[in-house]
Image (cartoon, grey):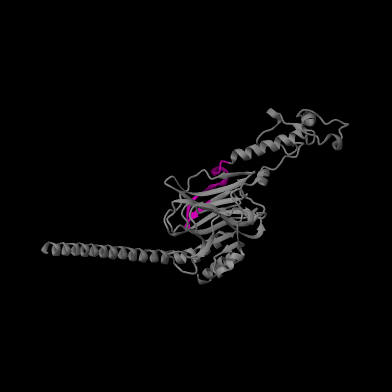
Amino acid sequence: MVSARVSLWTICVLRVALATVYFQEEFLDGERWRNRWVQSTNDSQFGHFRVSSGKFYGHKEKDKGLQTTQNSRFYAISASFKPFSNKGKTLVIQYTVKHEQKMDCGGGYIKVFPSDLDQKNMNGKSQYYIMFGPDICGFDIKKVHVILYFKNQYHENKKPIRCKVDGFTHLYTLILRPDLSYEVKVDGQSIESGSIEYDWNLTSLKKTEKTSLESKAWDQGEGSQAQDWEKHFLDAGASKQGDWNSELDGDWLQKPPYEDGLKAEGIDKDVWLHQKMRPAGYLTQYDLSEFENIGAIGLELWQVRSGTIFDNFLITDDEEYAEKFGKATWGETKGPEKEMDAVQAKEEVKKAREEDEEDLLMGKFHRHSHFSRFHRQGGL
């Protein structure tokens, strides 16, 4: 039993060790983050970031992240990394966000860009591959965006995914798998999952692509299908002609004695189509979750009230690594953060009560002084 547990532990450690981490940022090296992150200069009115752990935190150093600092501003900042393709691999995007200012209207989402992003000129029109994260504005908009770039268009998940609206740090995770399944997690808990193909209303696009490809292939006349189909697809009772030349005329085919020359199953192995048919999965070249040249991550958003902190960015191909990273960062500080907030709240209540009592005493003092002056004047 002990040996089995050790082996299982070894397998888990090995799996995490084999995870590919494309990008990871925790802002633990002071001001050196400025060497990795590029503030866009596309607009002189863009808001500025600083690294801070905020007014309350679980750990002063570990909870430091990029914080918005100016009200009613657009923000644009990004970091690049070695380009990669997630073709045939799981893609996990994860980060934490804290709206300690109690967000009234503004974005808390991130964007993943192709490697050719012009970071200095990054703006709202810069093409991105994925947009993910919370967006809050008034009573109507409290959602988690999951937008994917496909066939030169942006497509958003049709399912409503609600985000957190309090002032604490929350962990957001997006998982895109090669089988076209996806999962959205908040604070390590799955809140939405399903099929990328269906939950983004993209089935019609794939059908359009399929029809277009088939029509194009037929119009191009591969093997002269239109004119030679009947010539090479003969009746079952016909016998092979003596002057039949396989190199010039193609392979000898016989038409089975059933409608349209085809049936679902049981076709004799000697009867087969002249044209080479595409495999059933040929549309995988239009995979809805594959991005060839991922190379940057950034924040491009608007906020009415500033103060949001972004931290613990991660892009990897391993779900287990992302889970462990989340527990080692957000998982370790979420409790102490709430405790510090509770202590500060009590202190604020106590301070407010003391100020009220002081105001009350000062009011009594002024009334007493006024009465004393009046009494003295009346006595005179």
Quarter residue 377 falls in: bottom left
Q: Quadrant of the C terminus?
A: bottom left
Left or right: 228 in relation to 334 = right
Quarter residue 271 falls in: top right
> Would residue 253 be seen by someone viewing this image from the given angle?
yes
x 44%, y 44%: residue: 140
Quarter residue 20 falls in: bottom right
| Residue 363 position in % (x across, y down) | 23, 62
185 inside magenta stretch: yes
Q: Give above or below for 76 relative to 150.
A: below
Left or right: 201 in relation to 117 = left
Left or right: 212 in relation to 29 = right
Q: Give above or below for 169 relative to 256.
A: below
As drawn, the residue found furthest toward the left would be 379
Q: How many marks?
A: 0
As drawn, the residue found furthest toward the front would be 380
| Residue 290 position in % (x across, y down) | 63, 50
> Would residue 258 be seen by someone viewing this image from the given angle?
no
Using the image as rendered, state which of residue 244 and residue 7 is in the foreground: 7
| Residue 113 position in % (x across, y down) | 62, 53
Using the image as rendered, state which of residue 128 and residue 345 is in the foreground: 345
78 inside magenta stretch: no
x 85%, y 30%: residue: 241
| Residue 91 position in % (x across, y down) | 59, 55
Q: Give above or below for 346 relative to 214.
A: below
Using the image as rendered, state which of residue 337 and residue 89 is in the foreground: 337
Question: What stretch of residues is rendered in magenta?
Answer: 183-201
